[in-house]
Image: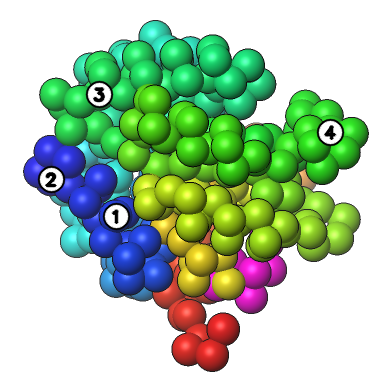
Amino acid sequence: MKQGELITLLNTYRKEQKCIIGFNINDIYDLQAVALAADEANCPVMAMTYPPVVELNSSFLCKKMVEGIQAKTKQPIYLHLDHSTSVDMCKQAIDDGYHSVMIDGSQKSLKENIAMTKEVVRYAESAGVLVEAEIGKIMGRDVVVKSDKDFLASVEDVRAIVEEANPHIMAVGIGTAHGFTPKAPKIHFDRLSEIAEAISVPLVLHGGTGIPDADIQRSIKIGVAKLNVGTIVHTTYMKELYNAIGKDVNSAYPPYLMKDVIPTIKDVVLDRLNAVNFVPANL
Ligand code: 13P
């Protein structure tokens, strides 16, 4: 892969109303499932590591793992650091050869968020690494929101961070939540459109597990060029593995179990890729 290739790809995707999916992966097995699905769907993917995965394994090892799987995968697998609140972790991932990093300053003041983002963008520049920033909040997990004002990205704030810090892509809080949601999230498409009119960088939609296909496709038409999908991947992995182990834990042997688990994870990944790659003309 050439330096800056992913940045060019996502800019083209925004113009052509296309979207790449970043899947949160945890180890070599769910990564294999993502790679198999990418080849079957005939489209590039992003493999994203959350900070705990990097803390446990190191960004060096994650990069080597993706490099190894890439060698037997036709489609590009771009490695991304997801939701890092640490500038140092982003810098280490860049040094270790990640294609893309997210510096998440969304819980900080706008001023601090801009400063953190600027520092990572400067560091990433010579390596041609893509930088994602976030404004607004993605609900769920430990993010507590009391009203729309808490999570909804303000157009002024998005414009400010893009003009001052120059991130390549922007994650924006518009009502989606991480994880399974009791009902479909209420996405503020009006705000998404206002943001898309205000800035030309590709937009990122987080919380892909709970977003209905029609809402995903409508977002792509507006300017979303990257969708994040995580929970559905690791819950499928854990449930299938749990069922495969069954009651006889003493005879459970990892390679035999994973041979059956990987195809199930792959099917879930493929299902999400099909949701993104099919965009009806009349939306
Ligand atoms: P889900 O876990 O809801 O799929 O969201 C993943 C995500 O947005 C990672 O950044």
Real-space CA distance between mark 3 and mark 1, rounded to the nearest whole angstrom: 17 Å
Residue hosting label 4: 145
Q: Position of residue 5 (x, y in %)?
A: 17, 47
Magenta: main secondary structure = helix
For the residues labelled 4 and 2, the Cα–Cα distance comes to 40 Å
Which sits in the foreground, 130 or 271?
Answer: 130
Disc 2: which residue:
1
Q: Are marks 4 and 1 in contact (CB under 8 Å)?
A: no
Q: Are marks 3 and 2 in contact (CB under 8 Å)?
A: no
Q: Looking at numbered disc 2 in the image, what kind of residue is underneath it? A: Met
Circle 1 Cα neighbour tier, 10 Å, few/some/many (<14 / 14–19 / ≥20): many
Whether residue 9 can be seen here: yes
Q: CA distance from mark 4 to mark 1?
A: 31 Å
Residue name at image x 48 percent, y 89 percent: 281
Disc 1: which residue: 11
Q: Which residue is mark 3?
A: 124
* Residue 144, image x, y percentages: 83, 29
Query: What residue range appears in magenta?
Result: 209-217
Q: Where 182 sits versus 135, above or below?
A: below
